[in-house]
Image (cartoon, rainbow, N blue to C red):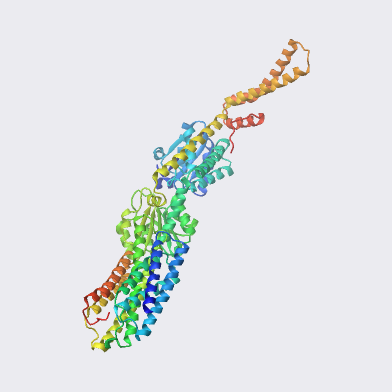
Amino acid sequence: MGVILFELALTLYFAATIVSVTELFKESKITSKITISSAVIGFTIHTASIIYRYVTAGHIPITNPHEATSFFTWCIVLIFFILQSKYKISLLSSFIMPIVFILMLSSSMLSREIKPLSPVLQSYWLGIHTVFAFLGNAAFAMAFCIGFMYLVQEHYVKSKRLGGLFERLPSLQTLDEMNYRLITFGFPLLTLAIITGALWAESAWGRFWNWDPRETWSLITWFIYAIILHARLVAGWRGKRAALLSMIGFLTIIIAFFGIKLLRKGLHVFL
Amino acid sequence: MKIFVVGLNHKVADVEVREKLAFNGPKLEEGLMRFRELPEIQEAIILSTCNRVELYANVNDAAKASESVKTFLAEFHNINRTSLDTALYIYDDISAVRHVFRVASSLDSMVVGEPQILGQLKDAFDLALSKKTTGILLNRLMKKAISVAKRVRTETRIAENAVSISFAAVELAKKIFTDLSTRVFMLLGAGEMAELAAKHLISNGVKEVLVSNRTFERACELAEEFHGRPVRFEDFIQEMVRTDIIICSTGAPHYILTKTQMHKVMKERKQRQVFIIDISVPRNIDPEINDLDNVYLYNVDDLQGVVDSNMFERQKEAQKAENIIAEEIETFLKWLASLDSVPTIIALREKAEEVRKEELDKLFHKIQGIGEKEKEAIEYMATAIMNKLIHPPTAALKEDSENKDILVATIKRLYGIEGEKNGD
């Protein structure tokens, strides 16, 4: 049952991705309806699959890479819906849905086995820490996407060749402000994730900070986003630089998330 | 009786000279009256815009007229008479007609196809009409020029060009800024195209309008027109710190904004995006400014490139317009020739002759059986009456009078002589 729900969600995300990518070339009312409805249905089924897994496993299903990636994807789609219903950024789905699909696909390829929860994870921190971390990272993923859209649009305006997507992409200022808002939303969540992580580490291992690779990378990520915010406020680093930095920030998150997993070293082994 | 044009435009004179010769506000009416009162001038119109000052007249002797107009301009504007000799262009006859048609059709404009010039020409003509400084020749010329311009506008795509440039500027602004109504706009300098683009932008709603000009008075005038605030030229760089959109067209021969200056401005405005449109030719803003982050600099060619990269198409449209003008010059010249007295004298005589013959035929048809001698006597009498009747108008036409054109037109009208059909 859980498998069916997950695969169904994956398929619907795939459909939304395909249709939204074709929208880069030709957009119509029908295509945008298909994109949104398959994303919404996909998200609903995805939610159901997470709840199902929660019920089956008996604990919050963010305890292994498969679950974590799946939950991360879920957070991104959630933020996408919130953003879309509030700001209606045209073509956003064409840029974010491929990321959603790739993440969901990688989740599907990871082991879905439900193992008994290790003692370290048996803590109320599990829910708090992971939700903060993934919601924050999802905001950064969205900022990455918006930053990329900014660079595309910026390229059109700067090079004075206004073909392709120029007409349909939002204004530079809109994208820039959206990027900034997402980072100001993600940054406190990341901070809270690090703090709750430290508290949890203290209760689990007796030390707040262990210089575990995951911790180190998180700190690096935190510094990158802190720099983005600081530079914007003080030196007015906005536009292209902010967009580039937000993309670099998210790439370090991806490295931290998947790279460290591949090395399988450190205390933070579960994810 | 000759059409005569003297003037200067953006191509031959830079803005300092144009400003000095401009007939602004109340000076226009006064200038027009004094221009008309010159002894060499029979009809007069003055067209004074940011990019051109032109005086149209009906004269008998172009050489005499040009001397007298130059002296008038020098006295009126209080400038050096000799400096005018090089600055002004002078046209008469066909070349004058061609020039007026080209100006009206916006082929002579800084941005070819911009529509404002026709309105400005109409205003100049309206003023002349209300002050009664024109007559048959210039009235005809102006009406024709306006209809030629309309023909060029409808039959070629020249006009689309300028409109679409302003349109492209606004579209670009909307792709840089989320909401134009929160943005500050500055018009730097003046000019047909710049003002057109500014109007277009302002009509899309901006928060605040600033106007700066080398002459502060002009800035005040334009600021009033656009409901904005005038800014002294020395202060415009400082104002750029809070300005988001700038349209620049100052006619300065060099850059008025360098990369280092802009770099400083960007620092002060915390790198907020700025959109600069440099319409000036030569360019007034260092093109390298576009390399700075968050600065988007477009010149006319860039905007043109946005609108239509097809140069060939544009040249074709311009050629089409020139052909229309050539055609219209032809019909105008025919009308002009018809004003000449000789054909009118001939036509008058032919008309009289026709009437005489007709009436004699009728008479001889009615009364049969009269002798050749009587016939001859009657014919003689008819000819004598005819000659006596057409003698005064013929003599008047042959006389070298100042208002011959009016006379010719009047005689044609009174005697019902068909001229060239010039349907306007």
Location of residue B328 with respect to B371 vertically, above or below = below
Location of residue A215 with respect to B62 vertically, above or below = below
Residue B6 visible in the shown view: no
Location of residue B302 with respect to A127 vertically, above or below = above
Q: Where is residue B386 in the image (x, y as percent from the top left)?
A: 68, 21
Q: Position of residue A158 (x, y in %)?
A: 34, 57
Image-based side of B141 in relation to A222, left or right: right
> Which residue does the image show at 53% across and 39% down from the upper left?
B44
Query: Closest to the observer: A81 or B302?
Result: A81
Q: Position of residue A3 (x, y in %)?
A: 36, 77
Image-based side of B376 in relation to B188, left or right: right
Image quadrant where residue B331 sits: top right
Disc tally is: 0
Location of residue B94 with respect to B271 vertically, above or below = above
> Which residue does the image show at 43% across and 38% down from the upper left?
B89
Query: Closest to the observer: A174 or A121?
Result: A121
Residue B128 visible in the shown view: yes
Position of the C terminus of chain B by quadrant:
top right
Q: Where is residue A32 in the image (x, y as percent from the top left)?
A: 45, 65
Image quadrant where residue A22 sits: bottom left
